[in-house]
Amino acid sequence: MNYQSHIAQNKLKEMRQAKGLTQGRVARHVGLDMVNRISYWEHGHAIPNIINLLKLCILYQTTPQEVYGSLTEVLKTEICPAPKDLPQASPPDLNKSQPESLPADPSLGPPANLPR
């Protein structure tokens, strides 16, 4: 299937403008030397790699699904239905506090930075 029309229907420009950022500032935050790469992504001429997409999502405080909603919906229709015996994945609750550390596994020995 040709995904180009769905890639072009992204919300990158809208999200950048909502944050009051220029393409130049976004490029610097993401670590790009070429400002025009942001324009290519916003106009759907190219799609960011996974690392840059995640950086943009962090910067814009959103998710890849929100950025590329149309593409996400098309991809959902292409995936075979999951077997009914598999548990359905739910998104993690990012607001839920996480434990500061997990209990140590004694079979692993002491941490490397401690004297033995």
Image (tube, grey):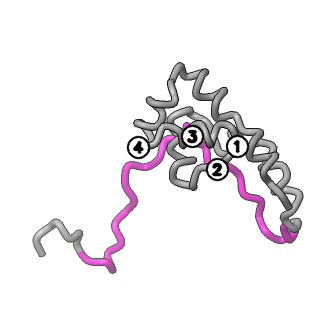
Q: Which residue is mark 3?
A: 57
Q: Residue at x 64, y 35 (%)?
A: 12
Q: Which residue is mark 1?
A: 44
CB under 8 Å between discs 4 and 2: no
Q: Which residue is mark 4?
A: 33
Q: Nearer the viewer, residue 95 or 99?
A: 95
Q: CA distance from mark 3 to mark 2?
A: 13 Å
Q: Nearer the viewer, mark 3 or mark 1?
A: 1
Q: Nearer the viewer, residue 74 or 25?
A: 25
For the magenta stretch, what is the residue range? 82-109
Q: CA distance from mark 1 to mark 4?
A: 19 Å
Give the structural element (helix, strand or loop) at label 2. loop
Say whether disc 4 or disc 3 marks the residue closer to the N-terminus.
4
The C terminus, quarter of image: bottom left
Q: CA distance from mark 4 to mark 2?
A: 17 Å
Give the structural element (helix, strand or loop) at label 3. helix
Provide residue 15's location: percent of width, then percent of height.
62, 28
Q: CA distance from mark 3 to mark 1?
A: 16 Å
- State the mark number for residue 47: 2
Say whether disc 4 or disc 2 marks the residue closer to the N-terminus.
4
